Amino acid sequence: MLFWVIVSVVMIVTMPNLDQLVREKGKTEIPSYMQSQVASKLLAEMEDEGTETYQFIAVFNSGSDKVLDENQLKEVNTAIETLRKDSDTLGVTSIIAHTDSDETAKQLVSEDETTILTQIAIDEKMGTVEEVAKILEERTELKSVETYLTGTDIVLDDFAKSSQEGIQKTEIIAIIFILIVLVLVFRSPVVPVISLITVGVSYIVSLGIVTQLVDHFNFPFSNFTQVFLIVILFGIGTDYNILLYTRFKEELGKQGHILKAITETYRTAGRTVIYSGMAVFIGFMALYLAEFKLYQATSAVAIGVMVLLLVLITLNPFFMAVFGIKMFWPAKTINGHSENKLWHFLSKHSFFRPIAALAIIAIICIPFIFVYSGELNYNDLVEISDEYESKQGITVIEDHFSAGFSSPTNLVIKADESLATQDGLKEIDQLADTISKVEGVSEVFSVTRPTGEKITDLYIDEQVSSLNNGLDSAQEGLGTINDGLSEAENELGQFDESSFDSVNDLISGTEEMGTGVSQLVDALNLIVGGLEDGSEGAKELSTNLSLLEDNVTLLKDSALELQSGYGQLQTGFSSFTQLFTSVNEALTSMNESYASIEQSMRSLIQSKPELEGDRNVQTALQTAVAAQQNLAPLMEQLETLTPQYNLSVESFKEANESLLAVTAGLQQIEDGVSKLQNGAEALSQGLETGVSGAGQIATKSEDLETGLKAVNDGQKQLQSGLTQLQEKISLLQDGLSQSTDGLTEINDGLNEAKDYLNGLGASNKVFYIPQEVLDGKDFEESLDMYMSLDRQTTRMMIILDVNPYSKEAMTIIEEIDKQVQSFSANLSFENAEIALGGKSAVNVDLQQMSSSDFTRTITIMLIGIAIVLLIITRSIWQPVVIIASLIVAYFTTLGITELISEYILGQSILSWNVPFFSFIMIVALGVDYSIFLMMRYREVEGKGAEGIVEAAKHIGGVVLSAALILGGTFAALIPSGIVTLMQVAIFVIVGLVLLSIMMLPIFMPAIMGGSTKIRNVFKKEK
């Protein structure tokens, strides 16, 4: 007794703080190789250089449906700036706020402008989640704005806090209930106190050992470890005490001597307790072999069971020896547990009517087995009361943002090289687009979509559209040039070459006049007549020269205007040289990109031949090949158009030079015509004077001859200029005709280019970022937000449109993961690490881990228990029957528990860990009670198989009392408010009813009775 007192005191004094231990080491941890943990590690390395941080979300709400006013916004902004200012003191590693940029404002401000979110990361070295949260709450508490602090870390911390509060309620209720039941069973106040002392010592010592192992040796621990230590130790400990005290009371009546009664009690009931305890110990100890830490943590119960057995075989005999008969005061008679009529009735009829008994069991069990949905709930929020601020904050977020914003999913990619390249960003955007199309995804934020929306200017279809707009402008310019050239060609085509004949006539007339003047001296008699003819000719010459001068002036002015317009056309047309170069470079780049895609796809097929038949791979390959084939004719057309375009430019140059020459010639013609007109006027005046005075003709004949010679020279000069003009106009007309034809061909080529680019743009909504944009400061903000400094790691923030803690979110994450895995096989950065993180992804990993480990763990547990049962029963058949009865009871109870949970707790499906905890409970308790029955059966083995009825009659009262106490102990979990514990409690209570009323007194006797009848039939046949 003194030993256990000392040990208990030492354990109490040295026991670590349980609340802190639960928060630090009680979280449900997933192995580091699971993708959610890989993502968490990569994200920490990317954002905080590997620093372990707590992630919080500060929720600022106006408190109504009204938008945040100026004063409220000022308060929020001041609080954020204060956090930034005190970041070193608070251990803040990063703050993402709406004031950072337009992109973050779009993310963190609700559409109704009533709510603002701020994401805060704090170094874990600053204290526990609760301590850090308390400081943050003080700094973010505002006068006119409702503020909530939430996030996955604080939600889990509140869950741990809620669990501890629930445990405290459970301890008190369980102790009170056990005391009441024991008083009713033994009708004595002494036995309950002794029982609670022994079980209480076991619990204190066990908890002390477990917490020391957890604190110093990192023994697996969880939120539920202490709970199960309480209910298991108080439950089965009381059961064992009932068995021992009942047998001790029975042996006192038989032996009459305390020591003999103690000896006989431990020879019979004590052995049963040891066997039962060892079966439970091995069952729980097998859980240490589980890979999942939560399952491993349950193995702590094995330590408690071992301590309990040590206490029961040492401390109980002490109390028996000290108190003796007084243990049962004020009982007047010393008898054992009375025979149980219920078990006797059920076992007797089941043994002799096995088929009917098994049919009844089937009718009861099968409907509930099939009604069980098999769906499990991974939503931690249902475990937390609405009174907690973290849950209230999530509710506010769901009301004003996409439901998944309270806990976004992060896709993290880490490569061996920079991802901030044109190809890398293109593939990242394609992956983001693939994810955004998954049903249930609300938004995807990435380096190429910093606001959750596409940057339209960075997609080929938009860029092609811009190029088409440029080509439209080019076509308009070409049309204007073509119209001008056509008009010029038509004007030149209307030029009347017959007007040159009048110049020849003038030359001939002048020559004749010269002849006449030279003959003037010899034929004076002809002077008057000749002068009259000359006068008329001079008048005609003057009139023609005046007309010619007007035409030449008009032609010169037209030529000058044509030269000016043509010069402008040449300048405008030459400006398209850069456009042709840009189009050629763009098409060349696109052709190289598609060639690269084709090469990558063919390399992929060579490296992974199994993908050759994959529809997506073939489609991608065919698209790349088709694109190259479509680009080839367009590039050839551009190569054909470029020389024509250059020829047109040269033609413009030559035409301009010709127009310069024409203009100069027309200027000379104008000068000559002017001289001719002056000469004609002088001639007219002279002839008129000659008519009045023929005598003066002779004296002025030399002047007249000189004048006629000058006129003849001017006429010849005019004829030469007009001849050159005729040649140049013909050349100009041919050049203009060629230019218009070339422009028509260019226009046709541009139309073909537009048609192709329209088709190309419609089929290529691909992200393409020009290098100058990639290197620009604007895009650098997005790179810094979504990429690491070395640009080798990037993240995508995926917002779901459902609660991220829900089962629906897990289904969406599984589909996202499937799409990511499929897409990643075709990435250029093949060796990149890609992982999904966040609460939804954690739940998916949790489901995978718990499901796979559940099967393996229960198999190990059943094997261990089966070995113990083989040793106890010395039979192969009986352990099989016992385990079969437990499995049937397990699945039946699952169905019943799910129904009760739906209609009483309002939870239509069970929490994800309920099946596991329920299984180990039903197996541990069922094995206990089965061993109670089978050990009693061994005491009456001389009666054959019918001895099971006798054993049931004697042990039934003990089992029913034990089941009542254990059921009451688990019922103490219901007021905890934790859904998981309440569902486990309901399961255990229902399971105990099935075990104590149906499986033990009906199923096992029916099986044994049926096997007896079968053996008898075979004996008769032999």
Image (cartoon, rainbow, N blue to C red):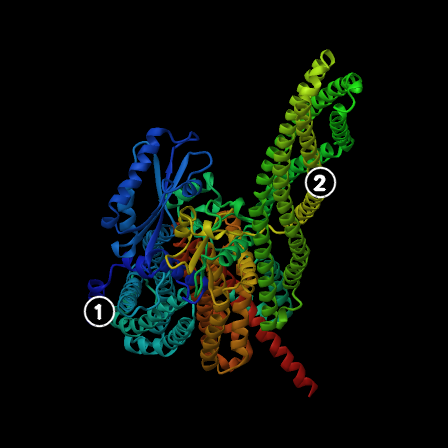
Q: Which residue is nearer to you in this view: 364 or 548?
A: 548
Residue for badge 2? 727
Question: Do tag 1 and tag 2 residues touch (Cβ < 8 Å)?
Answer: no
Q: Position of residue 949 (x, y in %)?
A: 53, 72
- The quarter of the picture where the N terminus appears is bottom left
User: From the viewer's perspective, is 881 left or right of 701?
Assistant: left
The image position of residue 1014, as x and y in percent, is 64, 79
Q: Amino acid at mark 2?
A: Glu
Q: State the quadrant of the C terminus.
A: bottom right
- Whichever of labels 1 and 2 marks the residue nearer the N terminus, that label is 1
Mark number displayed over residue 7: 1
The percent coordinates of residue 472 (x first, y second) are 63, 40
Callout 1 amino acid: Val
Horizontal side of 979 relative to 663 (left or right) equals left
Which residue is at a point 36% across and 79% down the rendered structure image? Answer: 267
The relative height of residue 401 versus residue 254 in the rendered view (above or below) is above
Local packing at callout 1 (Cα closer than 10 Å; few below 14, some 14-19, many 20+) is some
- Residue 533: which quarter of the image? top right
Viewer-side label of 1, 2: 2
In the displayed structure image, the side of residue 624 where residue 989 appears, left or right: left
Residue at position x 74%, y 24% in the image = 521
